[in-house]
Image: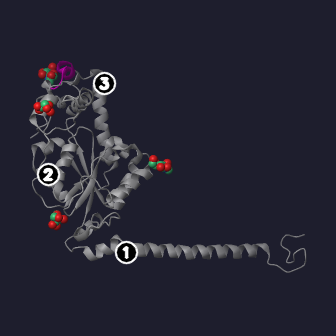
Amino acid sequence: MHPYSLKSSKGAPILPRPVFFFFVALCGFYVYYLSFNQITLENRKEGYNGEEQRANICRKPSVPYEELCYVHFPKPTSYSRGECSCTPVRFFVIVSMQRSGSGWFETLLYSHPNISSNGEIFNRVDRRENISSILQTLDKLYNLDWLTSAAKNDCTAAFGLKWMLNQGILENHDDIVSYLNKKGVSIIFLFRRNTLRQVISVLANDYDKDAKQLNGTHKSHVHSKEEAEILAKFKPKLDTSTLIANIRNIEKAIKDCLDHFKSTRHMILYYEDIIGNSNALSRVQEFLRVPVRPLMSRQVKIHTRPLPDLIKNWEDVSSKLNGTEFAHLLDGSDYAK
Ligand SMILES: *[C@@H]1O[C@H](CO)[C@@H](O)[C@H](O)[C@H]1NC(C)=O
Ligand SMILES: *[C@@H]1O[C@H](CO)[C@@H](O)[C@H](O)[C@H]1NC(C)=O
Ligand SMILES: *[C@@H]1O[C@H](CO)[C@@H](O)[C@H](O)[C@H]1NC(C)=O
Ligand SMILES: *[C@@H]1O[C@H](CO)[C@@H](O)[C@H](O)[C@H]1NC(C)=O
């Protein structure tokens, strides 16, 4: 029998198969169209009930147009922001490396009534296992549903976290950049100019993890001069065969990071600048658009002495670096002018 015959084998007239398929397709398309419409309608409704609507009610005319995407009115699911619900919130992330002063920097920010920084959220592997767990974690955080000791009774106007380069941020940089840009998150890069001092601090901190020099407890940060002096007594011996490669790796990670994230709203801050110049902290507060005030921390710097006093094999280290591209690190002090 001819496949396009107008009669079935039993003789009853039916539609030719192509026409039948056309109607089926049309039907399917119509259903799809209906549901699509409904989804967009729901999205629009959701938007109006959500941040957009609050933004329209709350937004003060003082926010310049080009900054609107960095101003948020989050609605946490776990509590109500109460009288603060119309306090605009800026989202930030401190991107840093171990032993670059980021712990100290965070305590400084913490002393500001309107800033909440929630620590190294991605130190837990399950939160950074893949890009979806990373974005889920960020979503929860920026919805202000992240309840830590950093929670405050004051009206938070800047809310963020600290994120180390070895916590999945470089591996997933493309997706993270587009998330941060879409979400309107600003980045504070905090690095250390003197990477040799950073290496020393890492080694000294690693040593204390085992040695527990302060009455049997390991401390990465201290709150008194006495404690600082005890920790600074230990002078690490640097492995000169890997030193240059180590320093080069650190500097490459910093450079790569700045490269990958250059399209974000960001500022670059160096540890040495915070120590040497109180103006640096004003710049940070202006960047976060919070009222500028003096910031305080109880933390005390551990390694304050000149480099030759900090390293056991100073002679070897200085002759290894002298004459190389890293020679400038030898006379670098943390107290840059
Ligand atoms: C991502 O990691 C989370 C948390 O460990 C896990 O539950 C999830 O299955 C992973 N998703 C993918 C797509 O691998
Ligand atoms: C900072 O917090 C105080 C106390 O809750 C609040 O009165 C003030 O409006 C906040 N400032 C900003 C800029 O959000
Ligand atoms: C260690 O403990 C002793 C006795 O409790 C105390 O006097 C001393 O200050 C402690 N030292 C440090 C560095 O915490
Ligand atoms: C580096 O080498 C030069 C020339 O040999 C020497 O004068 C200088 O003191 C050395 N610097 C350091 C920090 O060892």
**64 relative position to 262: left or right:** left
Q: Which residue is mark 3?
A: 242
* Residue type of the residue flagged with mark 1: Asn
Q: Which residue is mark 2?
A: 281
Q: Secondary structure at mark 1?
A: helix
Q: Which residue is mark 1?
A: 49
Q: Nearer the viewer, residue 332 or 9?
A: 9
**Mark sitting earlier along the chain (1/2):** 1
Identify whether 152 is placed above or below 125.
below
What is the x, y in percent for residue 44? 42, 75
x 37%, y 75%: residue: 48
Marks 3 and 1 in Cβ contact (< 8 Å): no
**298 relative position to 71: left or right:** left
Q: Residues within 10 Å of mark 3 (few under 14, many from 20)?
A: few
Segment colored magenta: 310-319
Q: Quadrant of the C terminus?
A: top left
Q: CA distance from mark 2 to mark 3?
A: 35 Å
**Mark sitting earlier along the chain (2/3):** 3
* Residue type of the residue flagged with mark 3: Thr
Identify whether 124 is placed above or below 1.
above
The image quarter in which residue 76 lies: bottom left
Task: Let me know if residue 10 is in the magenta part.
Answer: no
